[in-house]
Amino acid sequence: MGNWSLQQLLASLNDDIERRLENARECFGHPTTKGDASENVWLQLLQTYLPKRYSAEKAHVVDSNGVFSAQIDVVVFDRQYSPFIFNFEGQKIIPAESVYAVFEAKQDVDSDVVKYAQEKIASVRRLHRTSLPIPHAGGVYPPKSPIPILGGLLAFNSKWTPPLGTSLVEALGRCYSDCHLELGCIAAKGLFSFNQNTSTYEISTGGKPATAFLLELISRLQSKATVPMIDVQAYARWLSK
């Protein structure tokens, strides 16, 4: 029996993602088709490798006040405790309470793309989220505060030189409120992540960015525990309008 190599397995996963993103860029001429193909690469990565308590879809997010987000390329959300997802002709609508993370996916990164991603992520974070008390065997836990929603950016390449240098950090640093981006992957070049302890961006170039992103995302999702208990009746009131 041959020897297994964890290093080779993880490297192969990264190389497959990078190759598929490059093929999406080279094989499709229409910008929308090219963008859709790239988004699907990232979605399939997360749909395959995230723990099953999480789902990943392209979707709009809605709150119980009837406010909708912009369409988000990649939404990571809870499917263990969230009671519903609206799916009509391929258009998915997800309740705000179930969202863990949101990502914008693009071919290349520049300052305009970073700003656009920040605005898209902010449209989700500004939504209202309900939270109910949680019954348990010994009584009732008080309502849990909504968890911070992770926001990020996914791309194949960067228009900057160097790809993950000062220009990227300056663009990311222009927003530290609802539009803040904490995690991103430029598959052909590297990874960026925000360190809460030092309030600075950490840049990792080379290596296997797509695989590193996947593992970092899983780690950050683990640290967020579980989304709050959704108040379904807050949504049900729309049935009588």
Image (cartoon, rainbow, N blue to C red):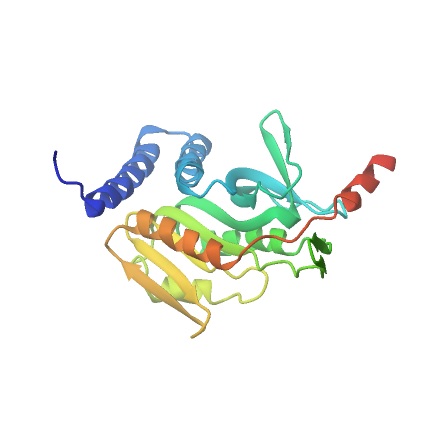
* Quarter containing the N terminus: top left
Q: x, y percentage for residue 152?
A: 47, 54
| Above-or-below relation of 90 to 129 | above
The residue at the point 62 percent across, 55 percent down is 125
139 or 144, nearer to the observer: 139
Locate residue 225: give its quadrant. bottom right
- Whole-percent x, y for residue 117 in the image: 51, 52
Direction left: furthest residue: 2
Q: Residue at x 30, y 51 (%)?
A: 209
Residue 13's x, y, as percent?
A: 28, 40
Q: Quadrant of the C terminus?
A: top right
30 and 151: which one is in front? Answer: 151
Q: Residue furthest top?
A: 89
Residue 39 to residue 179: above or below:
above
- Asked if one can make out residue 32 in the rendered structure from this viewpoint, the answer is yes
Query: Which residue of the protein is positioned furthest toward the right in this rendering?
Result: 240
**Vertically, is 75 above or below 162?**
above
The x and y percentages for residue 5 are 18, 44
Pick the front one: 164 or 87: 87
In the displayed structure image, the side of residue 30 where residue 236 appears, left or right: right
Q: Residue at x 43, y 44 (%)?
A: 106
- How many labels were placed on the picture? 0
- The picture quadrant where one finds residue 200 is bottom left
Front in this rendered view, residue 95 or 206: 95
